[in-house]
Amino acid sequence: PGRYFDRYEGHWLDDKKEGPGRYFYRSTSKVYEGEWVDDIPKCGEFKEAPPGSFDDFPVGGQADANPFTGAAASNSAGVFALPDLKLIQPDSVVTEAVATIRQQRAKDLGAPGLKVFESKEIQSLKKIFAAYDERDTGFVTCGDLLGLLQAAGVNVTPSTVEDLVLSLEADSATQLTFAEFVDIAALLMDGEGYEPDQSAEFDFGQGDGQDTYM
C-alpha cells in the first residue's frame, strides 16, 4: 500500500503555522489541537482523533484506497492510549494561555483597531468570565456575550453583538472559551464604527483553516 501522510489544518503566516490549528498524526490516530507560534505548537490538547478523521487522507506512492477508518486504525504498531490528565481545570489553563499568546501576537504585529490587553487586564477579564461560568466548565455562551462585554467596560450595543454573532454563523447557544471572549473584547473595545469582520480569528472549534498535507 501507499504511504499515509500527517495533516495540518489551521492558520498560516509567512508560510509558517500561526494561530489556531490542528495537526493529525496518521500513525498514532491522534490529533494536537491548539495554538501555534512561528511554526511551533505552544499550548493545546493532544488527544484521540475523532472517528473518520483519516478517511480522506492523501496517499503517497501507490494510489490505493485508505484502509484506515478513524481511531480504529489497523496500524496498531504506532497506536497508544493516552494517560489520564491530572491537571486541575486543564481547559481553563489552556484557554488562558491561548488568550495570552494571541494578545502577544497582536502586540507584535501591531494589529490596527485591536485592543491589546496587558496581563493584569487579562486577569480582570478572567474574573468576569468566571462569574458567568458558574459551573466552572471553561465555557460561556454567546447569549452571555453582551453581559460579559458590558461588565468588561466595552461600550457595545445589543445590535452590534447580535450582528457579530450572526457574522460568525453562531447563535445564543454557541459556546465560547475564555480566549475567544478576549479576542472579541479586543476587537470591540473601540466599538464606534465597528462592522463585523468575518476574517477575525474566531473558529469556535470548527476548524476554519486551510487543509495542508505534510
Image (spheres, rainbow, N blue to C red):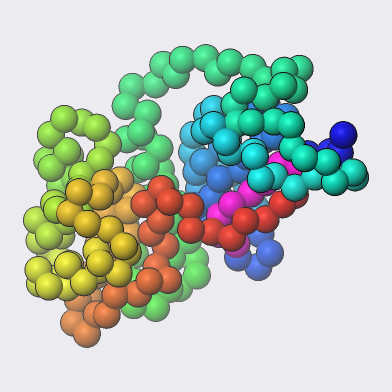
Please state if 101 lies on the left or on the right of 63 as rendered: left
**Residue at left offset 54%, top offset 31%:** 51
Q: Is residue 9 magenta?
A: yes
Q: Position of residue 98 (x, y in %)?
A: 42, 47
Residue nearest the viewer, comparing 154 with 166: 166
For residue 137, above or below residue 205: above
**Residue at left offset 62%, top offset 56%:** 211
View extreme (front): residue: 65
The region drawn magenta spans 5-12
For residue 203, above or below residue 196: above
Q: Position of residue 12 (x, y in %)?
A: 60, 62
Please state if 89 lies on the left or on the right of 82 as rendered: left
View extreme (bottom): residue: 193
User: In terms of image quadrants, where is residue 183?
Assistant: bottom left
**Residue at left offset 25%, top offset 67%:** 166
**Residue at left offset 9%, top offset 56%:** 147
For residue 68, above or below residue 161: above
Q: Position of residue 128 (x, y in %)?
A: 15, 47
Please state if 145 lies on the left or on the right of 118 as rendered: left
Q: Main secondary structure of the magenta part?
A: strand
Q: How many marks?
A: 0
Answer yes or no: is residue 120 visible. no
Q: Is residue 189 magenta?
A: no
Answer yes or no: is residue 70 visible. yes
Residue nearest the viewer, comparing 132 with 110: 132
Q: Quadrant of the N terminus?
A: top right
